Image: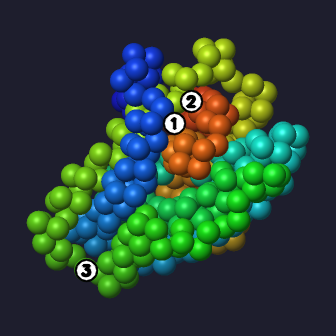
Amino acid sequence: MITLFVIVVVGYAAGKMNYMGGEFDRKLSSLVINWTCPALILSSAMTGELPDRRYILPLLGISAFTYVVLTVAAWALSRVLTRKIDERGVVAFALVFGNVGFMGYPVVASIFGNQAVFYAAVLNVVNTFAVFTIGTVMITGGEGPNRQRFNKKVLYSTPMLSAYLSMLIVALGIDNIPGYVSQPLTMIGNITVPAALLIIGSSMSQLPLRALLGTPVVYATTFLRLALLPLGVHFLCRALGFDSFVTNINTVVIAMPVATYGTILCLKYGRDTTLIAELTFITTLLSMLTIPLLVLLM
């Protein structure tokens, strides 16, 4: 996690030195969303090792349940946390979506072992669907004069098509995908993590230093994002009888800092990145403390 945070710092420096920023960030964001992210999603289902099939459906089920709960909670909490209509969508996005694809995989591997990365990838299928549907609606503005209606074309975007295909691969148990297909996808997908983190750092470089210190809204959202919501979902899932192994992986995944896609989507749809950048910075910094503490409590 410290390593990933260092990449954000490099992006910040690159932005300050004018190597990044403006049109470059917007084009790189489009490349990440439309090309490298779909490759990452597909490659996550081409590990060559099939997980225990008993966990596949429970993981999909608990993930779908989790995002329904988080979406409802975020809709209500965002209205309590801020009175500014333009901020509510960003706050709601921050409460619902953690950095699963970028930080979730290495953290899950360090806690549960390398094989658990596949289970995190199964959870990430629902996360990806939610980001580019519910998350897009949140970022583009759920209320006010700048509101944009949900575009059905999102369901057929390259990230969603790759999510559908990865689900098919898992469901059919296809484990003999040739290396000349999986390896290039893996290499292209590997661009996603550093590129997205560099974009976040570059976006932060456009903010005054005072803004990176956060606001009451930022810290209240951070507390909910990193602590209260993951614990609440964890105990709710245990009370409803979900498998403990599945519940633990799901809890760690949703305890990640704010998803980097928030910044990327703001850039893509021309929204102000100030609040999402502050939330991403603060949650990423504090998650280095909260995630280990959360694991100790489980």
Above or below, 150 against 17 in this view is: below
Mark 3 or mark 2, whichever is nearer to me: 2
Residue at left offset 60%, top offset 14%: 209
Mark 3 crowd level (few <14, some 14–19, many ≥20, 10 Å Cα): some
Answer left or right for 271 relative to 177.
right
Of the two numbered discs 3 and 2 on the same chain, state the one appearing first in sequence: 3
Task: Name the residue that disc number 3 marks.
Answer: 174
- Residue 24 position, x and y percent, is 40, 36
- Residue 42 position, x and y percent, is 32, 66
- Label 3 to label 2, Cα distance in Å? 39 Å
* Callout 3 touching callout 1 (CB < 8 Å): no
Location of residue 3 by image quarter: top left
Mark 2, secondary structure of its residue? helix
Mark 1, secondary structure of its residue? helix
Task: Name the residue that disc number 1 marks.
Answer: 292
* Amino acid on which disc 3 is placed: Ile
Please tell me which residue lies in front, 204 or 69.
Answer: 204
Mark 2 or mark 1, whichever is nearer to me: 2
Please tell me which residue lies in front, 121 or 207.
Answer: 207
Please tell me which residue lies in front, 123 or 218.
Answer: 218
- Label 2 to label 1, Cα distance in Å? 18 Å
Mark 3, secondary structure of its residue? loop
Task: Name the residue that disc number 2 marks.
Answer: 281
* Amino acid on which disc 2 is placed: Phe
Q: Residue furthest bottom?
A: 172
Of the two numbered discs 3 and 1 on the same chain, state the one appearing first in sequence: 3
Mark 3 or mark 1, whichever is nearer to me: 3
Residue at left offset 56%, top offset 29%: 281
- Residue 7 position, x and y percent, is 38, 29
